Image (cartoon, rainbow, N blue to C red):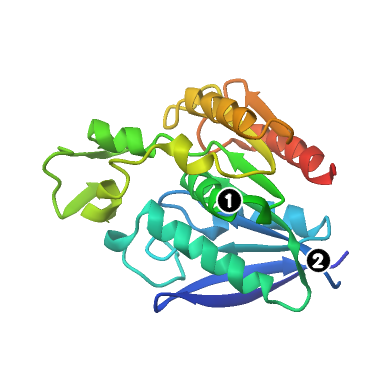
Amino acid sequence: MEIRKSRFSCVREGLTIRGNEYRANGEKQPIAIVSHGFMANQGTVKHYAKFFAERGYAAYTFDFNGGCVFLGKSDGKTTEMSVNTEVQDLLAVIEYVCRLPYTDESNIVLMGCSQGGFVSAIAAAKLKDKIKKLVLFYPALCIPDDARSGQMMFAKFDPQKLPDIVKCGPMKLGRCYVESVLNMDSYEEIKGYENDVLLVHGTADRIVDVKYAREAVRVYQKAYSIRNVEYYEIEKGAHMFSKKHDKIAMQYLDKFCTSK
């Protein structure tokens, strides 16, 4: 099967989102959209898109507006990026790919890693049953708690006296990044999603404690008990899976995406 890669772009509030499409020839192809994590770019998740394309999906990666430190192709400033703006970016991409003549808008998979997982989970909840399957690798459901604690990865701040610029390692964040999640409950944001979920998390994740994934599973199972919720822990798995652990995670992904 020959997989073709091509570029695409769409617009959210005047900002151009740029990404890549991976697919073989075909009509009414199911859709897979893969979202990258905090400070990363679409290149870090392209192997997942290729994985989907090899299984007959029209698969998409993209750079969030203002969401990349290096090599990002989309518009926007990092100081204007937040979880909420990334949700809006993802919704814009979903709307764009659903209008393509060769995609099947009734069969959509959202996949995200780290912050991209949190964003994908929120977007799926907003769209409820429009998303057929949701795949979350080490989703950063800790972000609101981290904001309230005054420490988000490399950034330290007083949540009661937020500066206009928050320095987080090589990335400059705006006040909006922290402010937008201070009163957010991660589980309230994600529980509205109605269909199947795959969640994979490492037990040695030092950025997003595995307890967040375990609670998400409980929330998903309680909200809609008849759907399929698959959860796997990768022993000694860290944030951003190693090649060894990623191979294990992709075996779970293959099983999940080929099941009805």
**The quadrant where residue 235 appears:** top right
**Residue visible at 71% across and 66% down in the picture:** 22
Q: Quadrant of the N terminus?
A: bottom right
Locate residue 27, reporting x and y percent. Answer: 85, 73
Judge whether residue 68 can be spotted in this image: no
SS for dot 2: strand
Locate residue 213, reporting x and y percent. Answer: 54, 29
Judge whether residue 253 can be spotted in this image: yes
Identify residue for label 1: 124
SS for dot 1: helix
Q: Locate residue 83 relative to residue 225 in the image: left or right.
A: left
Identify residue for label 2: 29
**Amino acid, disc 1:** Ala
**Residue visible at 67% across and 56% down in the picture:** 130
Q: Locate residue 46 relative to residue 66 in the image: left or right.
A: right
Q: Residues within 10 Å of mark 2 (few under 14, many from 20)?
A: many
Determine whether 235 is above or below 73 in the image: above
Locate residue 57, reporting x and y percent. Answer: 78, 61
Q: Please identify the residue farthest to the left as the structure is shown.
A: 161
Q: Nearer the viewer, residue 213 or 166?
A: 213
Determine whether 97 is above or below 54 in the image: below
Residue 167: image tag: none
Check whether the beta carbons of the residues at disc 2 and disc 1 lie within 8 A of each other.
no
Observer-side mark, 2 or 1, equals 1
| Of pointers 2 and 1, the one earlier in the residue sequence | 2
Determine whether 231 is above or below 1 in the image: above
Q: Nearer the viewer, residue 99 or 150?
A: 99
Q: CA distance from mark 2 to mark 1?
A: 20 Å
Q: Residues within 10 Å of mark 1 (few under 14, many from 20)?
A: many
Q: Quadrant of the C terminus?
A: top right
